[in-house]
Image: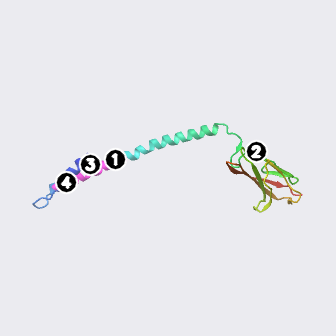
């Protein structure tokens, strides 16, 4: 029963009678209401069943896509730090027996200047290099390192079109 048909039947049934209430009219109104309620329930029941099919298909496609993506060999690139693996010295996470005398990193395309910042593990700045055009800096003798301490270092770079940063990288000095 479509909604237009229901509405017209309901209006006919609800027309006021000139006489006293009619039990037949009450039965007609109740029957029309039951029929409309059954139709609404059936529509709801059908719509509940239909949503899970596309959702299941979407979930299956997602699982397959993730499986395929993870099966493809990913390049060894540390995108969070902006470098390819193994191209910084000292290596991130390394334990060194002596303080580093030099920091090296990968050249960044279009970069015209680099500045290294060395920090303690609690983010206190130990030393900041002057801006350099080279992808390495020498550590001055005046920089003091503590045995057993962990250090973090970052490199900010700038160019005519872009700027960015590399790191943070960490290293630890072995205790004596």
Q: Which residue is mark 1?
A: 43
Instruction: Please check the rendered image and state whether residue 66 is part of the magenta-colored stretch, yes or no.
Output: no
Q: Nearer the viewer, mark 3 or mark 1?
A: 3
Relative to 161, 23 lies left or right: left
Mark 1 in CB contact with mark 4 (< 8 angstroms): no
Q: Which residue is mark 4?
A: 11
Relative to 66, 86 lies left or right: right
Q: Which residue is mark 2?
A: 107
Is the magenta region chiefly helix, strand or loop?
helix
Residue 57 in sight from this viewpoint = yes
For label 3, the SS is helix
Q: Which residue is mark 3?
A: 3
162 is higher (above) or lower (below) than 75: below
Label 1 and label 4: CA atoms lie apart by: 23 Å
Disc 1 crowd, CA 10 A, few/some/many (<14, 14-19, 20+): few
Which quadrant holds residue 143? bottom right
Question: Over which residues does the magenta segment extend?
Answer: 25-45
Relative to 16, 120 lies left or right: right
Closer-to-camera residue (91/39): 91
Label 3 and label 1: CA atoms lie apart by: 12 Å
Residue 26 x %, y %:
18, 56
């Amino acid at each position: 029963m479509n909604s237009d048909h229901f509405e017209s039947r309901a209006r006919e049934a609800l027309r006021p009678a000139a006489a006293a209430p009619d039990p037949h009219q009450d039965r007609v109104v109740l029957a029309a209401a039951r029929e409309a309620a059954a139709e609404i329930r059936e529509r709801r029941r059908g719509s509940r069943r239909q949503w899970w099919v596309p959702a299941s298909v979407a979930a299956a496609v997602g699982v397959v896509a993730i499986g395929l993506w993870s099966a493809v060999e990913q390049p060894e690139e540390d995108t969070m730090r902006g470098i390819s693996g193994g191209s910084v010295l000292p290596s991130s996470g390394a334990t060194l027996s002596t303080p580093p005398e030099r920091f090296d990193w990968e050249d960044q395309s279009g970069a015209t200047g680099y500045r290294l910042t060395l920090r303690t593990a609690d983010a206190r700045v130990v030393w900041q290099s002057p801006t350099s055009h080279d992808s390495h800096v020498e550590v001055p003798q005046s920089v003091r390192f503590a045995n057993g301490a962990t250090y973090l270092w970052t490199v900010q770079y700038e160019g005519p079109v872009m700027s960015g940063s590399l790191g943070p990288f960490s290293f630890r000095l072995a205790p004596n």
